[in-house]
Amino acid sequence: SPGDPWSSELLSALPRPQPKDAIRIASLNTLQQGTADPERSKVIRQMFELVQADAYCFNEEWKEEDFRRCCKNVLPARDKDWNIHWANTRGIASTLLLKPVELKGRNATAAIINAGDDELAVVSVHFKCCGYAGSKEDKQRIEQATSLVKDIESRLDSRPVVVLGDYNLVGARKPLAILEDAGFQEVLLRSPIDGSAITWRGMRADSSFWPGRLDYVTRNRAVRVVGKFTLDANQLGAIAAGNTRASDHSLLVVDNVVP
């Protein structure tokens, strides 16, 4: 449409809307509470409106009061109110019924989303940043993954569960393996533009780190994934008016069907 910030290439490449019985979840590390940034928040909203998810997960939303105020500026306009949960620097917002789940660990935020007769537990995770294999940060990620699995087993029982967000796997693969050993399966998301699985790119071209895959989605056997893709936040920001970049992370989008 006239004035649309997205390229025709992007719009034609986006997967079709999810089946009616699927619950679409989107997740974004907003980079240091990006919802409060006047320019970046505009692009985040454009991204969210583009994918029209049933629920959105946020990483790096440090302050609850700021998040609850600012997230309303990035959530798409709907004929229903948004239900919002925040804990441990992460937030979840949904137009569906949302029941917060208290976790012992501090590395994740969880809620049960109710769509009619269907319930889906969504866990927004952000493991420790940086380091390398064997570093103290890497060991902390392993401890966080172990704690998360215990939380899921004790508090979410046998519910359908999706765990998504910034896994920060720059060291050992063990945090992901811990989830896999607990019955979770990795869901590989790719860009509809170039097929890339990269989810992180520096905000500046001269970033000292190479682009890579930091953000993951895993699901247990009670969830069937029927659609999945990523949107490069940097690329989308460059397309949008003003050339503002939304984040250094890509947006994860996954369509889930539960029994």
Image: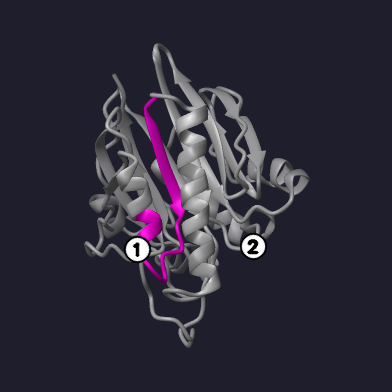
Mark drawn on residue 32:
2
Q: Is residue 246 visible?
A: no
Q: Is 49 situated left or right of 227 in this image?
A: right
Mark drawn on residue 126:
none
How busy is the neighbourhood of tag 2: few (under 14 within 10 Å), some, or many (20 plus)? few
Please state which of the two labelled residues, at mark 1 or mark 2, is closer to the viewer: 1
Instruction: Residue type at mark 1: give it.
Output: Arg
Was residue 114 drawn as part of the magenta stretch in this picture?
A: no
Was residue 160 drawn as part of the magenta stretch in this picture?
A: yes
Q: Is 139 situated left or right of 104 in this image?
A: left
At horizontal 49% and vertical 39% (from top left) the residue drawn is 150
Work out whether residue 9 or residue 140 is closer to the camera in this orientation and state it.
140
Q: Is residue 188 visible?
A: yes
At horizontal 51% and vertical 23% (from top left) the residue drawn is 96
At horizontal 39% and vertical 37% (from top left) the residue drawn is 162
Mark drawn on residue 173:
1
Instruction: Residue type at mark 2: give it.
Output: Gln
Considering the numbered disc 1 on the image, is that residue within a helix, a strand or a loop? Answer: loop
Point out the tag, 1 or 2, that comes first from the N-terminus: 2
Residue 125: x, y in percent?
51, 49
Residue 89: x, y in percent?
65, 50
Q: Which residues are magenta?
A: 159-176
Considering the numbered disc 2 on the image, is that residue within a helix, a strand or a loop? Answer: loop
Q: Is 170 situated left or right of 204 in this image?
A: left
Quadrant hosting residue 216: bottom left
Residue 199: x, y in percent?
38, 63
